[in-house]
Amino acid sequence: MEFLNVLSKLYIFGNLSLNINFLFILGFSLFLIGLFGIIYSLERVIIYLMCVELMWLGVGICFLSNYLYTQNPIALVFAIAVLSIAAAETAIGLALLVNFYRINKSISLRYLSNLRG
């Protein structure tokens, strides 16, 4: 309960308090920015991975706001799981990019068909 009291005293952008609607809108907008980034950056792999990371972050913020509203610890467990999956996905993606660059001397997705066996 102390965590909620501290969070309720936080102010963002002046007098705008941190409430449930703001957190859901923030999470949903981060998810949409990531989705549009994936649609518009099909050849740039680094930006593609960053947009996927933004989508994971938006989902995590929505789970955290659900936890703040319902006090259900399962939502907090899901938020931690989402952040863990996002970190693992980024590490594996960057390792694949390093190997892809060693083979093709480029990280463009145009050469992705070269990886077929």
Image (cartoon, helix red, strand yellow):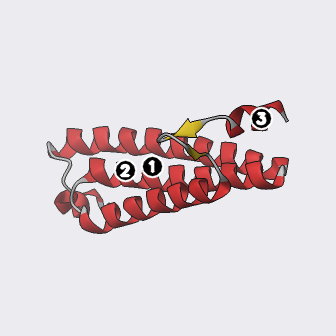
Whole-percent x, y for residue 104 in the image: 17, 47
**Mark in front: 3 vs 1:** 3
Q: Residue at x 77, y 38 (%)?
A: 4
Along the viewing direction, whichever of 105 and 72 lies nearer the viewer: 72
Residue that sits furthest to the front in the current view: 15
The image quadrant where one finds the N terminus is top right
Q: Which residue is mark 3?
A: 5
Whole-percent x, y for residue 89 in the image: 49, 46
Q: Please tell me whether residue 28 is drawn above or below residue 2 in the rendered image.
A: below
First-in-chain label (3 vs 1): 3
Q: Residue at x 45, y 49 (%)?
A: 53
Q: Secondary structure at mark 3?
A: helix
The image quadrant where one finds the C terminus is bottom left
**Disc number placed over residue 49 in the picture, else none:** 2
The residues bearing labels 3 and 1 have C-alpha atoms spaced at a distance of: 30 Å
Inspect the image, locate mark 2, and give the three-letter code of the amino acid beneath it: Leu
Q: Which residue is mark 1?
A: 53
